[in-house]
């Protein structure tokens, strides 16, 4: 049996020499030193030997097994290194290949317009002031000179909450009250942007949620000419330096006098087209001198202070600039629309 062991030892050493890959190595391991391998089997059969030979045989068999195990491990390492080198060579990176582009999100078209609006007003000294979307009836209407049964409330169909008197703001104008109350009697210049909500039949032109940008300037020496000069400067920066701007008399309960601002149609340059309903003009904002009642509600003395305010819709401005025909695209989350910006 000892001879058998030595022969096996030689065979194993020899055949290990020709093992060149991981598969063959595994076969070799199973054949000789694995749990059912030949060396292991011989070791197990030590009991069949006469008692006086067992110790010597066991000792030699263990030596051989340890030696083969060490040889096996060093062979395994050599093969691992070799296979690694080979796979690195085969899978070499071609640094001249163009990179794969990573899909990136974009800035929503409304936000792009909002940022443009903020930047222009910031140049004229107007800071952004944010106020709440969930508003009380009093600030949204009454403080702005729109009492309970005032017919102008029809202009703002309102979403009510389950708490009486708590509504979703129908416009950003209540921000006028919040900003005035915070700073009166100091002079202020703010733009108040944000979402507004109205209970409307959704159509190509009307959504139940939309952004507005309100503007407010209050001081001791502010006139209608300041309003016109400032809003004209804004309109020409956003729609083009030579763009004509006109002011049409209008009515809002919180301003007196009130006006609507039109710019020369940016598509037909005033000649008349379907976008401007063949009038040559596009309405872009409402504005006016802040009503004395509103100034007083904001904490200013209308005998000392005056101011102007305006309100505009960034979605409308975006639609005009890009020729978008349907406001529902804005909140439709359709990537085919959004990815165009
Ligand atoms: N709040 C008005 C609306 O939602 C817009 C507006 C008009 C705001 C005139 C103003 C203003 O500040 O002076 O229709």
Image (cartoon, grey):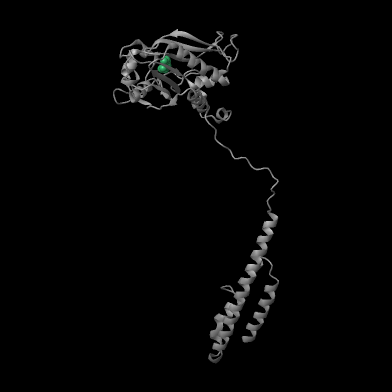
Label total for image: 0
30 or 274: which is nearer to us? 274
Q: Does residue 111 appear to the left or right of 149 in the view shown? A: right
At x 61%, y 78%, the residue is 67
Residue at 44% x, 18% y: name it: 311
Picture layout, residue 51 above or below residue 86: below
Quadrant of image for the N terminus: bottom right
Residue 120 at x, y percent in the picture: 51, 23
Query: Does 16 appear above or below 324?
Result: below
Along the horizontal axis of the image, is 88 left or right of 231? Answer: right
Image location (x, y in percent) of residue 129: 41, 27
Q: State the image coordinates of residue 147 (x, y, percent, origin top left).
A: 31, 14
Q: Quadrant of residue 105?
A: top right
Residue at image position (69%, 74%) is 15
Q: Quadrant of ligand 1?
A: top left
Residue 167 in view (yes/no): no
Q: Quadrant of the C terminus?
A: top right
Farthest-out residue, left? 164
Residue in the foreground of this view, choosing between 229 and 27: 229
- Spot occupied by residue 161 in the image (x, y as percentages of width and height): 33, 25
Image quadrant in which you'd find residue 36 = bottom right
The outermost residue toward the bottom is: 52
Asked if one can make out residue 336 in the rendered structure from this viewpoint, the answer is yes
């Amino acid at each position: 049996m000892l001879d058998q062991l030595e022969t096996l030892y030689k065979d194993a050493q020899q055949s290990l020499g020709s093992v060149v890959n991981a598969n063959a190595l595994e076969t070799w391991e199973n054949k000789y030193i694995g749990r059912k391998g030949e060396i292991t089997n011989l070791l197990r059969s030590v009991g069949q030997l006469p008692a006086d030979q067992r110790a010597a045989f066991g000792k030699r068999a263990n030596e051989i097994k340890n030696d083969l195990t060490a040889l096996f491990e060093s062979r395994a390492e050599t093969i691992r290194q070799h296979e690694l080198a080979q796979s690195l060579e085969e899978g070499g990176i071609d640094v001249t290949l163009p990179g794969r582009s990573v899909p990136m999100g974009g800035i929503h078209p409304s936000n792009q317009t909002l940022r443009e609006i903020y930047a222009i007003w910031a140049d004229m000294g107007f800071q952004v002031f944010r106020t709440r979307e969930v508003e009380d009836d009093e600030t949204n209407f009454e403080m702005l000179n729109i009492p309970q049964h005032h017919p102008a409330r029809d202009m703002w169909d309102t979403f009510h909450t389950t708490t009486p008197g708590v509504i979703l703001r129908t416009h950003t104008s209540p921000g006028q009250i919040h900003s005035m109350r915070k700073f009166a009697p100091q002079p202020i210049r703010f733009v108040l942007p944000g979402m507004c909500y109205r209970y409307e039949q959704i159509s190509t032109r009307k959504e139940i949620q939309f952004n507005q940008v309100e503007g407010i300037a209050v001081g001791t020496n502010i006139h209608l000419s300041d309003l016109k000069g400032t809003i004209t400067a804004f309109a020409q920066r956003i729609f083009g330096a030579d763009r004509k701007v006109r002011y049409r008399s209008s009515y809002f309960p919180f301003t007196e006098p009130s006006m609507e601002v039109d710019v020369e149609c940016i598509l037909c340059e005033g000649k008349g087209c379907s976008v401007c309903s063949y009038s040559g003009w596009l309405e872009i904002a409402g504005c006016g001198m802040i009503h004395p009642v509103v100034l007083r509600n904001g904490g200013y003395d209308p005998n000392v202070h005056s101011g102007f305010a305006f309100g505009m819709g960034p979605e409308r401005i975006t639609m005009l600039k890009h020729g978008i025909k349907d406001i529902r695209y804005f909140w439709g989350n359709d990537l085919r629309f959004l990815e165009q910006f």
